[in-house]
Every structure is written in C-alpha cells, then in structure tokens.
Image (spheres, rainbow, N blue to C red):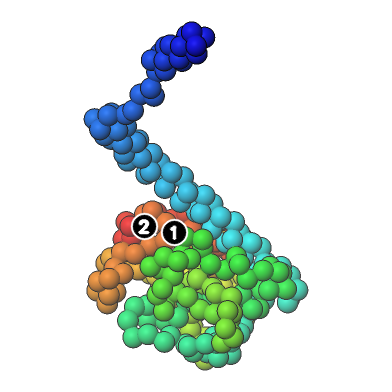
Amino acid sequence: MQSNQNRTEHDDGLNMNITRPHAFTLIELLVVITIIAILAAILFPVFSQAREKARQAACMSNLGQIGTAMAMYEQDYDEILPSRRDLKVSLPGGWKPWSVWPTSDPRCAWAAIVLYPYTKSYDIWICPTVKGSQMGRQIQVIQTISSDPGAPLTGYWMWRFDRPDDPIPLSDLWGKSDDQSVLDLQAAKDPNAGYPNSVSDVEICVDPYFPSTIPTVPASIKGLGVHFGGRNRVFLDTHVKFFRDYRTH
C-alpha cells in the first residue's frame, strides 16, 4: 500500500516537472511574417530579372540558330536567299490579317517551314518570353505553320521578307544574293531598313515590338516589347546582337 502511494507521489512529481512547449505569440508571428514579406519584396525583382536574363539568352540562341540555318540554306542554293512568297500568302490567316500597325506582315512561319531541314526544330521560332505573354496573344506576332490543331507556333519578325509584291521591293530580300541584298537596301534608302555597308548590317530576324512613337499602334500594346528596353536581332552574317530601343518598355 505504501509502495503504491510512493509510486503515485513519484509520478505526480514527474508530471509537475514536465515543461510545456512554448507557443508563438501573435506579435512574434506578425514579426516573422513581416520579415518574410520584406525579404520577398527585396528578392522577387532579383529573381525576376535573373529569369528574364535567362530567357533573353535563350532567345539569342534561337536567333543564332536561325541565322546559321539561313546561311546553310544559301550554301545549298547557289548563295541565294529563299523566295517563298507563295508560303507568305497561303499560311493560316493569309498575308497581314490586321488593319493596324505594322503596315506589312513580318511574321515568319514560312521560314520555319523552309529552314526546317537545317534547324530540325520548330521550337526555336518563338522567344521564351513571348510564350504565354501579352505579346504572344497579338495577331501581328503569332503564326502557325499550318491550320492543324496544335501546329507549331512562330513569334519572330522578318522585316526583309514582309511583302509578297511582284516585282520584289528593294527593301525585301526574296531570292537575292547577299551582295545584291546590300546593294538593293542601299538603293532603297528606306529609313526603317537603314543603310547597310555590309551583310553584318542586314537584319533578317528580330523580336517583335510595338513602338510608342507610332500613332496607329493601339493604346493597349503601345510601347510593348519582348525584353526590357529592347530586342534581340540576328543579321545576315549570323551574328546576334541586343538592340536597345527607347520606344519600348
């Protein structure tokens, strides 16, 4: 009987010595939440910028592959650039299915088809930043290579292959050699195309953009660009360069 009593007293002593876990007070929780919010506000722009830099680098890689594919095409076709105005007008939506800027149709699904034997991929024909963005919802930007459901998308612009006119305009490069392209662009004196001194000045593919200085650009997309403050471009000699443009954001 005494043994049971001693055991009971011993058990009660153990129970009295148990330390209950410390709970966070409301103030402590609010402090922690505030610190997390401050850190998130500081780090989110850094992560966002890093992610965009990675996308811009991937875009430059895409354009580099497109430039190389165009050069390989020329090697196989007597140093002549493609001339597929038939594709330009026959792809889904036809030529220029819009009434606002731009005044021509620089979309490039035709090139994705023609250069496929050299690229072996349709994935390179759209910038990662364009996918799922406001830019990627613009009719002037996105074009499919066919009317089939799930057909690959393209989202770059090729200004020097933007018109199906006959005869071919001086500012377009359909079926021309590199040297003739430079000479014709010089003769065109087109301020939008610039005055090239060599093939290294002839742009063939570029990120889409909607300049803030063009009155006919709808207000909802005025100033819209792909990358922060500019766009990537690939030239006829296959080099890729970022162009800073104050007209976009």
Q: Write down the quadrant of residue 47 in the picture.
A: top left
Which label sits on residue 106? none
Q: Position of residue 229 (x, y in %)?
A: 36, 54
Visible residue check, residue 159: no
Q: Are the residues flagged by discs 2 and 1 in contact, CB closer than 8 Å?
A: yes
Along the viewing direction, whichever of 107 and 30 lies nearer the viewer: 30
Give the amino acid type for the residue marked by disc 1 in the picture: Arg
Q: Residue furthest front?
A: 1
As helix, strand or loop, the secondary structure at mark 1 comes to: strand
The residue indicated by pointer 2 is: 245
Q: Position of residue 116 (x, y in %)?
A: 68, 74
Q: Residue at x 57, y 83 (%)?
A: 149
As helix, strand or loop, the secondary structure at mark 2 comes to: loop
Which label sits on residue 231? 1
Q: Position of residue 90 (x, y in %)?
A: 55, 91
In the displayed structure, would residue 124 be above or below residue 146?
Answer: above
Q: Sort mark 2 into few (<14), some (14-19) or many (20+) by Cα contacts within 10 Å.
A: some
Visible residue check, residue 37: yes
Q: Would residue 84 appear left or right of 197 to someone viewing this image?
A: right
Along the viewing direction, whichever of 237 and 215 lies nearer the viewer: 215
Q: Would residue 209 appear left or right of 233 to someone viewing this image?
A: left
Q: Residue furthest right?
A: 76
Q: Sort mark 1 into few (<14), some (14-19) or many (20+) by Cα contacts within 10 Å.
A: many
> Which sits earlier in the primary sequence, circle 2 or circle 1?
1
Q: Residue at x 49, y 89 (%)?
A: 94
Give the amino acid type for the residue marked by disc 2 in the picture: Asp
Q: Residue at x 29, y 74 (%)?
A: 217
Along the viewing direction, whichever of 247 and 177 lies nearer the viewer: 247
In the displayed structure, would residue 129 be above or below residue 173?
Answer: above
Along the viewing direction, whichever of 228 and 68 lies nearer the viewer: 228
In space, the residues marked 2 and 1 are separated at their CA atoms by 7 Å
